[in-house]
Amino acid sequence: MRILRTTTLAALLAGIAATVSSVPAANHAAAAVMKTCPQSEMEYCVRGKDGFKHTAWTNHCFAKESGLHILHKGACKGTGMH
């Protein structure tokens, strides 16, 4: 009976440890960006990966991480491909 309880407890603890250690791994990229990028954002005219320009609240660091190219500060005058 004592062996069964010890085995069950060991399996339960191993499962908890695996769950706890895998959760942060999923957020490592987001955590790295949060630690290195300034948290202030401004309105910029940006061009996305798809080639369309649009207005976004971002900063140079977040834009780079998101694959956006900053065209200029402030809102875009028009939208579309450029």
Image: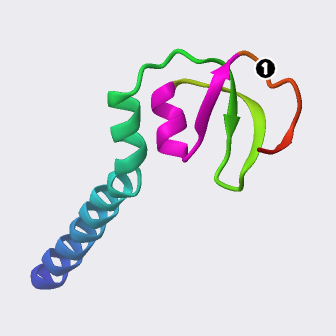
Q: Examine the image and state in which quarter residue 79 appears.
A: top right
Please tell me whether residue 38 is drawn above or below residue 69 in the rendered image. above
Query: Looking at the picture, how far across and down is residue 65, in whole percent?
Result: 47, 42
- Which residues make up the magenta segment? 60-73
Direction from residue 12 to residue 37 in the image, left or right:
right
Quadrant location of the N terminus in the rendered image: bottom left
| Residue placed under numbered mark 1 in the picture | 75
**Classed neighbour count for the residue bearing mark 1: other residues with Cα under 10 Å, few (<14), some (14–19), many (≥20):** some
Query: Looking at the picture, how far across and down is residue 54, in whole percent?
Result: 78, 35
Farthest residue in the front direction? 82
Direction from residue 37 to residue 70 in the image, left or right:
right
| Residue at 64 percent of width and 53 percent of height | 49
Mark 1 belongs to which amino acid?
Ala
Residue 70 on the magenta span: yes
Q: Nearer the viewer, residue 12 or 32?
A: 32
Query: Looking at the picture, how far across and down is residue 44, in whole percent?
Result: 67, 23
Per the image, label 1 sits on a secondary structure element best described as: loop
Q: Nearer the viewer, residue 11 or 18?
A: 18
Q: Nearer the viewer, residue 81 or 4?
A: 81
| Residue at 19 percent of width and 76 percent of height | 5
